[in-house]
């Protein structure tokens, strides 16, 4: 008899529904993860992604992409794509282990933390981050992990908080790996973590690839990478972790080639096969006929010790079409000004990439798993 199945909403919070997630991995149910504590977002996702409506029984998971504007897209994954990702991750890290959840559970990064732990045979340890991340609670949470190998996953903003808390830093240094993804990790922050003994692994991936599929530039087992056009070109990812497509969007151009996902990222692959992400194609700034990748400018600005965080974007300009604008968070206790930011940038960048305007804020707006909300930022500046 044909399995007549509907997509079921799965409310997730710091209290993981291990039974439902076990069913998901067994292929006996099809779920749409939603935030248990946010009824408005739950309703939006359920409506947009067809909760309660029929679904192919080969699809075990529909997970929303992390965008918060417009209609969300739902990446469709089978048990095979999920387990391929989980097994390749454990292989890269040195073996299966227990996982600590310190991310929102309904996003792919947090969900995979739960699924990896369950597949390895361990009940995941979870932190409630619905009202923010407190590094102090990390200490007791890591103490609760009884598995021989222990793993967790953080976003860069959480890592900053950990490094400001000596006990949390010591506790995190004792685990076997800390995946850091969801947003680009500044090199200065990476160096600080390594010097503190934290075994961080930089990850690159998205909902469409079951989360991270490239670790420290290395593709996981089964992942293939193509670069479209001249380097840096658009990154195209293939392999068993790639989603079957978007729910309700069978002809979406990102999935034109079966088994491949056409990202919006620009990158290069070196002679050793290591992937470097340069920036996003849809965030490139066209100023005076030249193209500037914001992430390149951000990387330079973040090497200035007086700057703790920044975002670069293009705003309308009557003469240039767009102008390069930097939004900066000053490092604690640092003396920083518009002129000092521009002067530092001019020492390391072509003059066309030097920000024409500089704005200072206390914090950058974030969305999803730690990504800068550039749309919200742009709206405050226009």
Image (cartoon, rainbow, N blue to C red):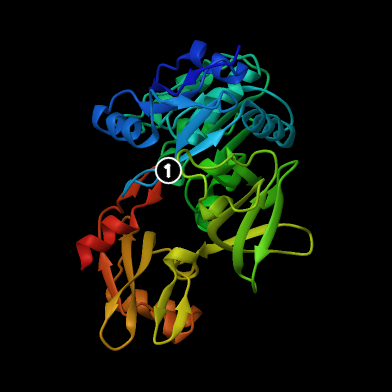
Name, please, the residue furthest toward the front. Answer: 1
Q: Locate residue 216, reporting x and y percent.
A: 65, 49
Q: For residue 94, which quarter of the picture?
A: top right
Above or below 15: residue 311: below
Residue at figure coordinates x 57%, y 46% from the top left: 205
Q: Locate residue 21, reporting x and y percent.
A: 52, 18
Above or below 170: residue 96: above
Residue 334 showing in the rendered view:
no
Above or below 257: residue 88: above
Q: In which quarter of the image is the C terminus?
A: bottom left
Which one is nearer the viewer's eye here, 332 or 237?
237
Which one is nearer the viewer's eye here, 370 or 148?
370
Q: Mark 1 points at which residue?
A: 73
Query: What SS does tag 1 mark?
Result: loop
Which one is nearer the viewer's eye here, 320 or 258?
258
On screen, residue 157 versus residue 364, left or right, reads right
Residue 322 showing in the rendered view:
yes
Q: In which quarter of the image is the N terminus?
A: top right
Q: For residue 58, which quarter of the picture?
A: top right
Q: Locate residue 324, reporting x and y percent.
A: 35, 76
On screen, residue 69 versus residue 16, left or right, reads left
Are there few (<14), some (14-19), or many (20+) residues within 10 Å of tag 1? Answer: many
């Amino acid at each position: 008899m044909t399995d007549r199945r509907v997509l079921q909403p799965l409310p997730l919070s710091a209290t993981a529904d291990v039974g439902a997630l076990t069913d998901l991995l067994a292929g006996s149910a099809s779920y749409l993860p939603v935030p248990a504590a946010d009824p408005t977002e739950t309703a939006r996702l359920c409506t947009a992604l067809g909760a309660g409506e029929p679904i192919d029984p080969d699809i075990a998971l529909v997970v929303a992409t992390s965008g918060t504007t417009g209609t969300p897209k739902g990446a469709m994954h089978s048990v095979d794509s999920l387990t391929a990702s989980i097994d390749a991750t454990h292989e890269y890290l040195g073996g299966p282990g227990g996982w600590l959840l310190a991310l929102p559970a309904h996003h792919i990064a947090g969900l995979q933390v739960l699924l990896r732990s369950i597949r390895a045979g361990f009940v995941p340890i979870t932190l409630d981050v619905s009202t923010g991340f407190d590094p102090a609670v990390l200490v007791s949470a890591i103490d609760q992990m009884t598995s021989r190998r222990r793993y967790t996953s953080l976003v860069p903003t959480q890592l900053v908080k950990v490094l400001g808390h000596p006990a949390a830093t010591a506790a995190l240094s004792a685990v076997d790996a800390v995946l850091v993804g969801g947003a680009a990790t500044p090199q200065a922050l990476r160096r600080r973590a390594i010097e503190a003994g934290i075994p961080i692994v930089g990850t690159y991936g998205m909902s469409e690839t079951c989360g991270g599929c490239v670790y420290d530039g290395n593709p996981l087992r089964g992942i293939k990478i193509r670069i479209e056009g001249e380097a840096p070109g658009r990154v195209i990812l293939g392999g068993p972790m790639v989603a079957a497509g978007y729910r309700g969007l069978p002809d979406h151009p990102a999935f034109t080639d079966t088994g491949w996902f056409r990202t919006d990222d620009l990158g290069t692959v070196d002679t050793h096969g290591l992937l470097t992400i340069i920036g996003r194609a849809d965030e490139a700034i066209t100023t005076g006929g030249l193209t500037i990748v914001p992430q390149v400018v951000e990387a330079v600005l973040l090497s200035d010790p007086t700057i703790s965080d920044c975002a670069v974007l293009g705003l309308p300009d009557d003469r240039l079409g767009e102008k390069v604008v930097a939004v900066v968070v000053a490092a604690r206790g640092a003396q920083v000004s518009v002129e000092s930011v521009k002067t530092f940038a001019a020492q390391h960048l072509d003059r066309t990439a030097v920000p024409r305007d500089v704005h200072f804020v206390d914090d950058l707006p974030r969305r999803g798993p730690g990504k800068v909300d550039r749309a919200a930022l742009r709206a405050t500046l226009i």
